[in-house]
Image: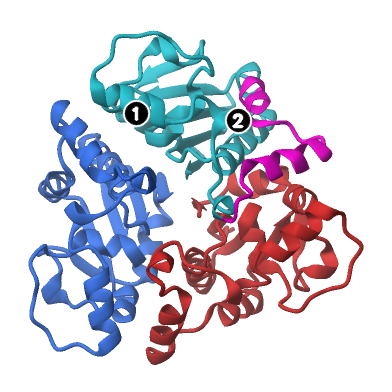
Chain colours: A red, B cyan, C blue
Amino acid sequence: MTEKKQTTIVLFSGEYDKVMAAYIIANGAAAYNHEVTIFHTFWGLNALRKDEKVQLEKGFMEKMFSKMMPRGADKMGLTKMNYLGFGPKMIKAVMKKHNSMPLPQLIDMAKDQGVKLVACTMTMDLLGLQQEELLDKIEYAGVGAYLADAENGNVNLFI
Amino acid sequence: MTEKKQTTIVLFSGEYDKVMAAYIIANGAAAYNHEVTIFHTFWGLNALRKDEKVQLEKGFMEKMFSKMMPRGADKMGLTKMNYLGFGPKMIKAVMKKHNSMPLPQLIDMAKDQGVKLVACTMTMDLLGLQQEELLDKIEYAGVGAYLADAENGNVNLFI
Amino acid sequence: MTEKKQTTIVLFSGEYDKVMAAYIIANGAAAYNHEVTIFHTFWGLNALRKDEKVQLEKGFMEKMFSKMMPRGADKMGLTKMNYLGFGPKMIKAVMKKHNSMPLPQLIDMAKDQGVKLVACTMTMDLLGLQQEELLDKIEYAGVGAYLADAENGNVNLFI
């Protein structure tokens, strides 16, 4: 009996470049026949938001978070170069030039390859995000489920 | 003979949200019966500072670092949203609303669960932090000790 | 037959302190007789740039990236404290005081110890960096090669 290798990524960060790195590694690992899980927590959860506005009852702070945080991966800033007035536009332009996949497509590809996309339920509570606002076909779990995957993982990363 | 699983975290970052993520994973892993070590290096070392001022002889630069760096986990900023004028207050408010444990309690809980909290001695030298300024019941070690733990680890993360 | 332990680091970040942490861990692991690989991707690739200017034909955006990004590890900023007007000078001063190795020497030491330094070819394409601009004696590979190393790694970190 051969067991599949496992790659498990905690995606904590919510910047375009870091999320892109996470999804490139995840897609690569899936192509190498790994079982892959991305556990989206804190700002990383924004990668799973739908890009349209969803009408929901929310408290004041939950509304504030909803407004302040990017709605989906395509709207995220960079970890660097933002302060110079550039930011994601320049990255997206060179990606287009080099025929690299933009982030939303990398996420679709991960789904198609069977990468397990998990939304951290504790973060959803904290930031007031609800299932209706998040992409379809994702899973919902807490840190316990992450650890159950990670403790048998070959490649475990915190991004 | 069954061996315990091991989780080893390098805590490099000194922001409230990242430190919180580290301690939530550490506490979760301890609850799952892992042996857990957090190796606090660079800015992560500030999580282990006592919150009161400790009178010590220090050189000029060591005094500057002492003043500029947060005294303990509760005084840390966030990786994001600080720039919008919000910052940790908003996070602490939603955490309170949802009965989440604030960071200082997460650190106490980790100690109670037997998580090994290690202060990187090289960083202490560099930043001029002394044992009297750090929390009780922590250990002191260098990168060699970290690697000795990590090379047998099941879950190794750099946060 | 005894197999060597393996440490594999994805170096995504391009700040002086994070790159220093990566190279300290890498050098430590090499001293512990691990096989060590650092896969330099995104901003981490700047650690491998030569510090002199290299004349090359480049498009407009590639020229912009070349100018905006630090030429080599010694010119990088910090993750923190930059905003207070301090930055790497203060860190370099305390490192000198404590006889710590500056980053360029840590990189040389890593090479001498046989740490495998890999430049991510996808990032080179994106940011328009060419082999002539990068240090000698490094390897060139993609995410697949990283995963082939990492899936057998004992210590895998994303920095």
User: Which residue range is magenta in the image?
Assistant: B84-109
Residue A38 visible in rendering: no
Pick whichever, B59 or C23, lies toward us: B59
Picture quadrant where residue B36 is located: top right
**Residue A45 disc label:** none
The answer to whether residue C67 is magenta is: no
Q: Residues within 10 Å of mark 2 (few under 14, many from 20)?
A: many
Query: Where is residue C91 drawn, in percent x and y?
Result: 24, 37
Q: Secondary structure at mark 1?
A: helix
Pick whichever, C10 or A7, lies toward us: C10
Which chain is mark 1 on? Answer: B
Query: Where is residue C35 drawn, in percent x and y?
Result: 26, 47
Would you place residue A5 above or below residue B15 in this image?
below
- Does the residue at mark 1 contact the one at mark 2 (Cβ under 8 Å)? no
Q: Which residue is mark 1?
A: B65
Pick whichever, C126 or C149, lies toward us: C126
Would you place residue B82 above or below residue A55 in this image?
above
Amino acid type of the residue that numbered disc 1 sits on in the rendered structure: Phe
